[in-house]
Amino acid sequence: MTTLNNGILTVGIDNHGAELCSLKRGDREYLWGAYPEFWKRHSPVLFPIVGSVWNGEYRFKGKTYEMGQHGLARDMDFTPVSSSGSEAWFELHSTEDTLLKYPYPFVLRIGYRLKENTLEVCWEVENPSDEEMYFQIGAHPAFYWPVLSTEAIKSGLDAMKEELAKDKKRGYFKFEVDKPLKLLSFFPENFEFISSDVIGKKGCIDDSCGRYQQICDNMLGVTTEFFDQDAFIIDKPKIKAVTLCDMEEKEYLTLRSNTPLVGLWSPPKKNAPFVCIEPWYGRADDMNYKGDFEEKPYMNRLEPKAVFKANYEITIH
């Protein structure tokens, strides 16, 4: 485990998946504890796909490959490259085994950098080959709901369940966008407001579903039922930042990114103690998708010998 500390924030990163495992300000833990009863991960990287491919397989140059949900990097051991106390980098290289599932050589680097009360997470995808490569990448950080007390989080799952059972309300999402929002619309064809896809069969996109949620001052109240139909994937308009607020609308944490999509998720119908705010360069297949890998929506193309760079930030208020 690599630990970073700048006097304000303390973070812990595991070599396995280069996964962020702890994010603390003072004695408050903000990152979900990965209790398997709800979800056994903290903040996995999603690479080289985000979400699922239809029927667990995809096609490339006439050959069919199998790929599990969210790709393979989250389940591999990264090599620590550097650590300075407030910044650390980890690296993963393609192998003979990865080429059986994902036919591109690659180097994936993940960096963590503390800046006052903000954690910056950096991605670098390098294409070392002489052919172009296609990939998706995203993050899946899980945060404790702001309604939970620090004492309950420290005490463990039973204490958190007891607190959550008292009220269905969990807080608010505040969206930073280019224009004010009055309606959150989960219809992909409705471009006047936020459009969003929902997860359907086999973890793929079902664009036949539609729901509405009222918004006031770009804020949306969240209850336990909000995720009963699984994740929301928002792509229009572009979300610059999502702030999670407490019941008094006080800012708790903000995730800021430049990604074309943002996912919101908590385990459906489980009253889980956490919510995920997920910046994505890519998304799951549409249900019944039969196209080639490089034709998937939101696919990223990288020239030979080129490096893709991106980042997102988590600010603790």
Image (spheres, rainbow, N blue to C red):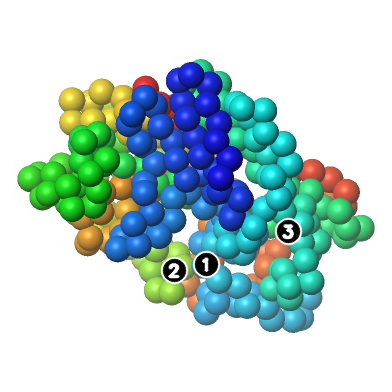
The answer to whether 163 appears left or right of 148 in the picture is: left
Would you say the residues marked 3 and 2 are in contact, meaning their CB atoms lie under 8 Å apart?
no
Residues packed near mark 1 inside 10 Å, few (<14), some (14 to 19) or many (20 plus): some
Q: Which mark is residue 295?
A: none
Q: Amino acid at mark 3?
A: Tyr
Residues packed near mark 3 inside 10 Å, few (<14), some (14 to 19) or many (20 plus): some
Would you say the residues marked 1 and 3 are in contact, meaning their CB atoms lie under 8 Å apart?
no
Q: Which mark is residue 203?
A: 2
Q: Position of residue 235 (x, y in %)?
A: 48, 46
Q: CA distance from mark 1 to mark 2?
A: 8 Å
Q: Position of residue 213 (x, y in %)?
A: 24, 44
Q: CA distance from mark 1 to mark 3?
A: 17 Å
Q: Residue at x 79, y 43 (%)?
A: 307
State the residue position of label 1: 69
Element at label 3 = strand
Residues packed near mark 2 inside 10 Å, few (<14), some (14 to 19) or many (20 plus): many
